[in-house]
Amino acid sequence: MDRAAPPVTRFAPSPNGRLHLGHALSAIVAHDLAREGGGRFLLRIEDIDGPRSRPELADEFRRDLEWLGLEWEEVSAQSTRLASYAAAADDLKARGLIYPCTCTRSEIEAAGALPGAEGLIYPGTCKHRAPDPARPAAWRLDAEKALAITGPLVWEDALAGPQQVDLADLGDVVLVRKDLPASYHLAVTLDDAADGVTLVTRGADLFAASHVHRTLQALLGLPVPRWHHHPLLLGEDGEKLAKRRGSPALAERREGGEDGRVLAAQLRMQLLALGT
Ligand code: GLU
Ligand code: ZN
């Protein structure tokens, strides 16, 4: 990647809950990095979370970002991109890089799965068996096969430095959900490539996911961005602030008359204090 090129960043919220302080911080990081580099800041609504998705929240998100004093270019929501996910999934299927898995959560637990970077590491139950066609199937990355094809891969985080891809803590992640033509991992990787995102910013809680995304970029011949995983805001109790019970949504603060630009300035101070 040409490092001198102005960065393209994005904020990609899922409308399955209101935005909180942690989201504001993520949006500000993406916005400011784009502005500082003379680049572009995109907004993409990640609205494919099936029944949990509440499309009416997208408007609230736009009002929240405006209230924080941010300006953005909006790109297509994920729900309009399902065909591109299906095409990539078909390609991965045809190459034998993903396999169907009919396991339920309780079956995975019963198989003695160990905890990993994002929940239980799939123990591989379906990898070597023919799936029961009567049961709904998700499709999982065959991490072993993927690694054999890609060889060692590296990616670069602006704060943490160069990273060697390691899928051990993630295992055979789901790339196609039982109810959708993609999972978060597949959709976000394809979308970031399609939108020309060159600097992927998000919270450090999603750091491990980038190993999967880098692998998918190699398998699907997609451009490789840089990453910037920002530290999370923690409450005094050390819990993730975004999820902390009782922490008010941005919309509530906005409707309560608080000045969003002042809040944004405070968050920028906190970012400095966090050392980014
Ligand atoms: N839609 C995802 C979320 O809200 C985006 C994560 C990312 O930036 O990759 O968590
Ligand atoms: Zn399975």
Image (tube, rainbow, N blue to C red):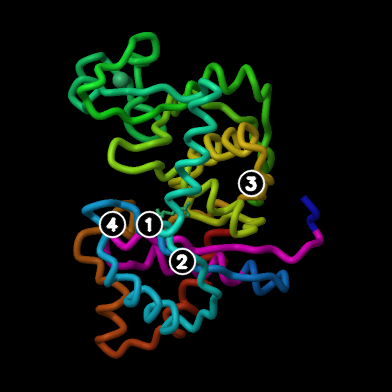
* Magenta region: 4-32
The x and y percentages for residue 136 are: 24, 29
In the image, which disc is placed on residue 243? 4
Please name which of the two marks, 3 or 1, marks the residue nearer to the observer: 3
Decide if residue 159 is on the left or right side of residue 43: right
Taking the image in four quarters, ligand 1 sits in the one at bottom left
Residue for point 27% across, 23% down: 102
Q: Please tell me which of labels 4 and 1 falls first in the chain.
A: 1
Mark 3, Cα crowd under 10 Å, few <14 / some 14-19 / many 20+, is some
The x and y percentages for residue 70 are: 51, 79
Q: Which residue is mark 2?
A: 25
Q: Is residue 247 above or below residue 251?
A: above
Please name which of the two marks, 4 or 1, marks the residue nearer to the observer: 4
Mark 2, Cα crowd under 10 Å, few <14 / some 14-19 / many 20+, is many
Q: Please tell me which of labels 2 and 3 falls first in the chain.
A: 2
User: Is the C-beta separation of discs 2 and 4 under 8 Å?
Assistant: no
Which element carries disc 2, helix, strand or loop?
Answer: helix
**Kind of residue at badge 3:** Asp
Decide if residue 258 is on the left or right side of residue 268: left
User: Is the C-beta separation of discs 4 and 3 under 8 Å?
Assistant: no
Decide if residue 130 is on the left or right side of residue 44: left
Which element carries disc 1, helix, strand or loop?
Answer: loop
